[in-house]
Amino acid sequence: MDCFRQGLARRGFPEKLYTDQGKIFTSYHLQIVCANLGVRICHAQPYAAWSKGKLERWFRSLQMDFEARLIIDPAHTLEEINARLWRWIESEYHQRTHSALEGRLRRNGFAQRALNLRTADPRTDWEALFLSRAQRRVRLDATFSLEGHLWERPFICAANSFRCALIPSSGAASKYGGTTNTSARLAAATNNSRQNLYRPRL
């Protein structure tokens, strides 16, 4: 999702997002994100490689050129790989001509077709656009699970269902909708094991 966000911030919002049937591309989270962005999701047919030929050709170029260089000159950290990949894409791949573009540079072909592309406002709240939403029920010990982690809310919320959102950058879960917006925090397993499992009397 972070890679998708960076692409939108750099290139703008497309009318359609064309993907395969991978789990992350058919997820409810991506559907919500694209709905927030006004982008339509289109999926390629299963077992129909021809329907995503351009993408397959991109991976072939990546393997034969960029990855081949890593064999000769290995990268030692993930940050180094990402930096070299971005440099290769911007300074080499986009600067090459393409037969489908009548011999024009890839960069120029994109620029010509992107005249009406919606660009991101500098004040865009990316966290709000990329919130991961889910329906959860708070257990009697005031905890709930989300994205593989255990979270805790105020004890008064125990045994109640609510809608929550996960902020990617900070990892904070919060209730949304209505007039309330209360944050949750990651639960400490050792502390939580000593809590009284019964709701307090009001």
Image: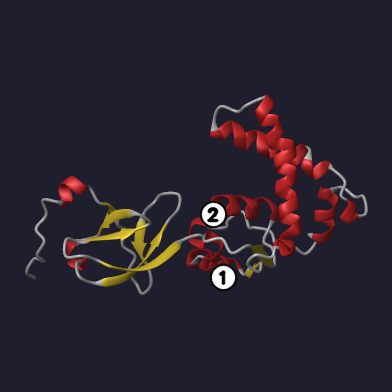
In this view, the residue farthest toward the front is 47
Q: Earlier in the sequence, mark 1 or mark 2?
A: 2
In this orientation, which residue lies closer to the viewer: 98 or 21?
A: 21
x and y percentages locating residue 63 in the rendered image: 70, 41
Q: Residue at x 11, y 61 (%)?
A: 197
Whether residue 109 sits left or right of residue 4 in the image: it is right
CA neighbours of label 2 inside 10 A, class few (<14), some (14 to 19), many (20+): few
Which image quadrant: the C terminus?
bottom left
Residue at image position (64%, 52%) is 7
Q: Position of residue 102 (x, y in %)?
A: 93, 54
Question: Does dot 1 land on a helix, a strand or a loop?
Answer: helix
* Residue type at tag 2: Met
Query: Which of the numbered marks, if any, corresponds to residue 1?
Result: 2
Residue at the location (90% across, 50% down)? 104
Circle on res. 35: 1
Q: Going by the picture, which residue comes out furthest to the top?
A: 73
**Residue type highlighted by circle 1:** Ala
How is the model colour-coded? secondary structure
Q: Position of residue 14 (x, y in %)?
A: 69, 63
Instruction: Name which quarter of the figure residue 86 lies in.
Output: top right
Q: CA distance from mark 1 to mark 2?
A: 14 Å
* Element carrying mark 2: loop
Image quarter (top left, top right, bottom left or bottom right) of the N terminus: bottom right
Q: Quadrant of residue 143?
A: bottom left
User: Taking 125 as reference, is 93 above or below it?
Assistant: above
Q: Is residue 201 above or below residue 80?
A: below
